[in-house]
Amino acid sequence: MSVTMRDVALLARVSNKTVSNVVNDHPHVHPETRARVQRAIAELGYRPNLSARGLRSGRTGVIGLAVPDLRQTYFAELADAVLAAAERRNLGVIVGQVGVDREHEIAVLANGLRQTDGLLFSPEKLGTEDRGLLDGVEYPLVLLGERIFGGPTDHVTMHNVEAARAAVEHLVGLGRRRIAVLGAHPDHRSGQLRPSDLRVRGYREALAAAGLPEDPRLEREVAPWLPEDGAAATRRLLAEGIEVDAIFTLNDTLAVGALRALGEAGRRVPEDVAVIGFDDITLGRFTLPSLSSIDPGRDEIAETAVAMLVERIAWGAGSGHAPRLHKAAFRVVARESTVGPGASAHPAGTA
């Protein structure tokens, strides 16, 4: 016979309502009681009936995640982390790929994803100037990324400027003085809140703090951020004969391409050119040499965003709770591409 909520309640010595509150991740459950119910759920192998629960509550037990492009490894790994965080709460996830089309993003923002109770949304084309669009959103929403600040919704993001600065400080601390950056945005629009602009700002701040001059020839525009683009940008940099002893790429997939191009040119990494990326994707552990990177707190971002969305769903529309902003902690992960052969990954800095 299948295990019921009543079976869990009896084993945990609580009411059916308390079990329901734990299953639905309501915030106001005493930690000791929550732990006792979770142990009972695990012992009995209880699995909530999401369909029946949805009929009773008007909810589906499913949340949405909308990201720009799953070809970008960061977003694929973010989706994996969101799926894990949701599964711990007995929630399903529908993942939508929005692309880089502004009208598509507006449509997703207006309507959410079908058959979901709320949405985690990482826009690419919308910006802070579009935050008025959030006023008409009538479903639980948590924003991810850097594009829209100051709106009426919860927002989970990362320390782009500070983390980029830490990456360059890591290179400076190793004695590097001619540090190129790959991934600047090619449209030159000022006042943007994009990962590229914020990370370039951190790069410049680190150079200034170290007393190193800015050289526009070392700031390379690259879009999109794919391995082939990182390789092409590195080949151009080397072909121009520009002196460089380190490269900071604004994501790890650009760094993978840079490593390829440096190897083709006979440049040793890190002896001749040190390389550090951003995002700490799994692939970076297996490149040769292994890739130093910034861990931007992806798991923390996923866990916090899902928790916030679950709370918004539980509170319901018009709850009056103020919007919250959370920035995840980051760390510099030093591997072979900056600190040499045989290095094991270790945090070189945190915030």
Image (cartoon, helix red, strand yellow):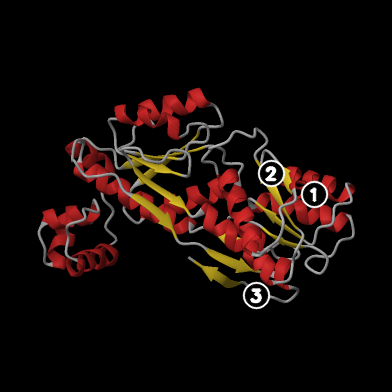
For the residues carrying marks 1 and 3, which lies nearer the camera in this image? Answer: 1
Residue under the point 69% across and 44% down: 226
| Residue 280 in view | no
How much space separates mark 1 and mark 2, taking CA atoms? 13 Å
Cβ–Cβ under 8 Å for marks 1 and 2:
no
Mark 2 is surrounded, within 10 Å at the Cα level, by few (under 14), some (14 to 19) or many (20 or more) other residues, namely many
- Residue 233: x and y in percent read 78, 45
Q: Position of residue 321 (x, y in %)?
A: 21, 44
Can residue 142 be seen from the camera position used here?
yes
Q: Earlier in the sequence, mark 1 or mark 2?
A: 2
> Depth check: 33 or 98 in front?
98
Numbered tag placed on residue 344 in the rendering: 3
Which residue occupies 44% across, 26% down? 106
Of residue 198 and residue 334, the one placed in the foreground of this image is 198
Q: Residue at x 48, y 59 (%)?
A: 297
How far apart marks 2 and 3 lie (CA) works out to 26 Å
Type of amino acid under label 1: Thr
The Cα–Cα distance between marks 1 and 3, rounded to whole angstroms, is: 26 Å
Give the structural element (helix, strand or loop) at label 3.
Answer: loop
Residue 177 lies in what quarter of the image?
Answer: bottom right
Q: Check the picture and name the quadrant holding the N terminus.
A: bottom left
Name the spot of residue 229 as percent of width and height, x first.
74, 42
**Under tag 2, what secondary structure?**
loop
Q: Earlier in the sequence, mark 1 or mark 3?
A: 1
Q: Which residue is mark 1?
A: 234
Q: Is residue 288 left or right of residue 52?
A: right
Query: Which residue lies under the disc numbered 2?
Result: 226
Question: Element under label 1?
Answer: helix
Report how many numbered discs are placed on residues in the image.
Answer: 3
